[in-house]
Image: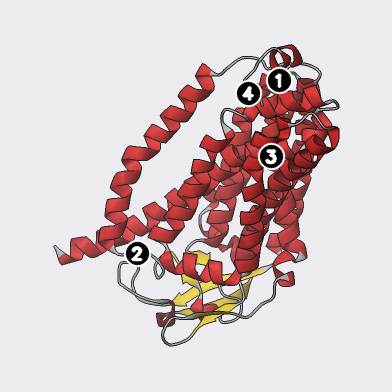
Amino acid sequence: MEGFAFEAYAVLKVVWWVLLGVLLTGIGVMVGMDMGVGTILRYVGRTDAERRVAINVIGPHWDGNQVWFILGGGAIFAAWPLVYATAFSGFYIVMLLLLWSMIVRPLGFEYRSKMPSDRWRAAWDGTLFISGFLPMLVFGAAIGNVLQGVPFNFDWRLRSFYTGSFIELFNPFAILCGLMSVSLAVYMGGSILGRAAGEPVGQRARTAGMAAAIAALVLFTIGGFWVANLSGYQLVSGPPADAAQTPLHQEVAYVPGALLANYTAHPILWVFPGLAYAGLLIGLVSLATRHPLVAWWFGVLAWIGVMGTVGASMFPFLMPSITHPSHSLTVWNSGSSLRTLAWMLGFTLIFMPLIIAYTSWAFWVMRGKVDVKKIESSDHAL
């Protein structure tokens, strides 16, 4: 029985690694969609009424979509507590920026139409842009930093020490990843507006989505060549995967080209970059031929491809250390206990389908076009 428990422990760690990727993809798709609308709000809406159309397309859904953000943070906290603690120590200032930008987001939705003043509404439009652009930039930049390695190390008591600076977090590769994230968010936002917003807002949104798809394709390609020339991390030795362990019980090497090692060992993993390219290319064509709903679903495929590419490049690492590579956090050494992971998996299998079902039902019930006439005739519109 003891051997079975240890074997189940290793399986649960991998399962939660996959679930973490699912939750991060959910953040990109659902939260990113809303933030993409905020980012292009002033472009798609040339008048106040047109901007209200864009806001009311996502108005019934944006707060519900934030549940993916909460689930992602909660999963890291409960399933990977050492990753959570180390990341929040190193990314503290960035997390505060993210938090402040998201605090003003609901204020922008709720307060914007409370006064007829153009200056008042323009100010809140600015907050919707900031709270749309900045979080997705930080989201992508965080992934870019994790791919390169984060400057931290542990002492013998497993206290983490961040050895970098705030400016280093926004290095050129991280900015590229951040812009990639913003591009995908704008693509998703353009697709949902292209489907649900009346003209001319819908047409401008489809145009913005096509531009974002092209930008994402270019950035993903540049990022691929960049990653091929980056050094990565290789687990040289350590305890068995199903053993209880800490980052102090392993040896990790910093090796040129290691981010492509998993692709060399398992060529099937190239399906993930292929999904990203296929999703963006077919989505681009779908927007050009006025099929924004199809484009939205291929945007989901693109997000799966992008996040899958990151995961496949890094496994088994979750948060490698560039300061002391052997202190890197992996799937094997930073997870919660067997009992915690098992209980959380049970709750996840119950509640995640409920969340997906409720979200789908909400979009179905509130389907249909939102146009200027509908907004101006409604007393409940934002």
Asked if residue 246 lies left or right of residue 272, the reply is: left
Residue at mark 3? 108
- Residue 62 locus on image (x, y percent): 58, 35
Dot in front, 2 or 1: 1
Task: Tell me the element at label 2.
Answer: loop
Marks 3 and 1, the one that precedes in the sequence: 3
Query: How packed is label 2: few (under 14 Cα within 10 Å), some, or many (20 or more)?
Result: many
| Frontmost residue, 224 versus 118 | 118
Quarter in which the N terminus is drawn: bottom left
* Sequence-wise first label, 4 or 1: 1
Tell me whether circle 3 and circle 1 mark residues in contact (CB < 8 Å).
no
- Sequence-wise, the earlier of marks 3 and 2 is 3
Question: Label 3 amino acid?
Answer: Gly
Q: Is residue 257 visible?
A: no
Which dot marks residue 197? 1
Give the colour scheme of this rendering: secondary structure
According to the picture, the residue beneath numbered tag 2 turns out to be 336
- Asked which secondary structure carries label 1, the reply is loop
Mark pair 3, 2: CA separation: 38 Å
At label 2, which amino acid type do we have?
A: Ser
Q: Name the one closer to the observer, 214 or 71.
A: 71
The x and y percentages for residue 33 are: 64, 36
Which quarter of the picture shows residue 324?
bottom right
Which callout, 3 or 1, points to the residue nearer the camera? 3
Q: Amino acid at mark 1?
A: Ala
Closer to the chain start, of discs 2 and 1, is 1
345 w.r.t. 359: above or below: below
Which residue corresponds to mark 4? Answer: 294
